[in-house]
Image (cartoon, helix red, strand yellow):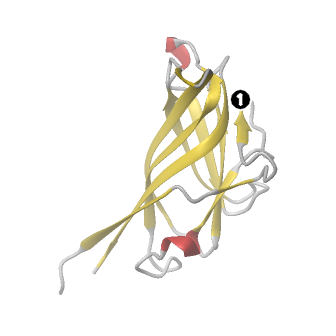
Amino acid sequence: MPPTRTYYKHTEDVAFADTVNNNAVFDNAWDLTEYFELDLDDLNLQVDREEDYFVIDEIVCVGAGTAPSNTNKEDAQILISTNNSFTEVVSFDYGKMSDGTYTISGTAYTVIVFHLSHPIYTNSDKLYFTVKTPQSSTQTCTKVSIQISQEYQ
């Protein structure tokens, strides 16, 4: 039997629900109309998604926003679904939001990071992601980075 290999794929190629502003506005209440989507066919995964799984290792969301207090920074949440109405949820997890901002050209930016490592089986062509930020924080997400891995022989 050949050795098991791990295939890693990194992408920043996501589409936002708000195609006019090309962003998703996240705050501390679920707003299922604010999301980004990932077209799985664009990833050129090495195995059949219906029979094998892949793992979303990390998701990083960056955008203008307000940071939470130190006590709330680990309360970011993410829903991942196979449809944009979020009735077919395939994953839920907690993440961390930066407890401070950094400024570029007068705009304060925040970072939200999710380390998921959940195996996902799906025959869907797309995944949809929405985020709930910690109490007293917001983010207008304009950039997403996703790391995916997949083992195969």
Left or right of 127 on screen, residue 25: right
Q: Residues within 10 Å of mark 1 (few under 14, many from 20)?
A: many
Counting from the top left corner in percent of width and height, residue 109 is at 57, 27
Left or right of 129 on screen, residue 116: left
Q: Amino acid at mark 1?
A: Asp
With respect to residue 88, does 60 lie above or below? Answer: above
With respect to residue 60, does 105 lie above or below? Answer: above
* Residue at 48% over, 37% down: 113
In the foreground, 131 or 14: 14
Counting from the top left corner in percent of width and height, residue 57 is at 41, 52
User: What is the quadrant of residue 76 in the picture?
Assistant: top right
Q: Residue furthest front?
A: 105
* Residue at 17% over, 87% down: 1
In the foreground, 113 or 119: 113
In the foreground, 103 or 90: 103
**SS for callout 1:** loop
Q: Count all numbered tags in the image, as a single digit.
A: 1
User: What is the quadrant of residue 135 in the picture?
Assistant: top right
* Residue at 51% over, 76% down: 49
With respect to residue 74, does 153 lie above or below? Answer: below
In the foreground, 24 or 103: 103
* Residue at 71% over, 44% down: 23
Which quadrant of the rendered structure holds the C terminus?
bottom left
Residue at which label 1 appears? 27
Counting from the top left corner in percent of width and height, residue 45 is at 45, 75
Left or right of 20 on screen, residue 129: left
Counting from the top left corner in percent of width and height, residue 29 is at 75, 30
With respect to residue 19, does 48 lie above or below? Answer: below
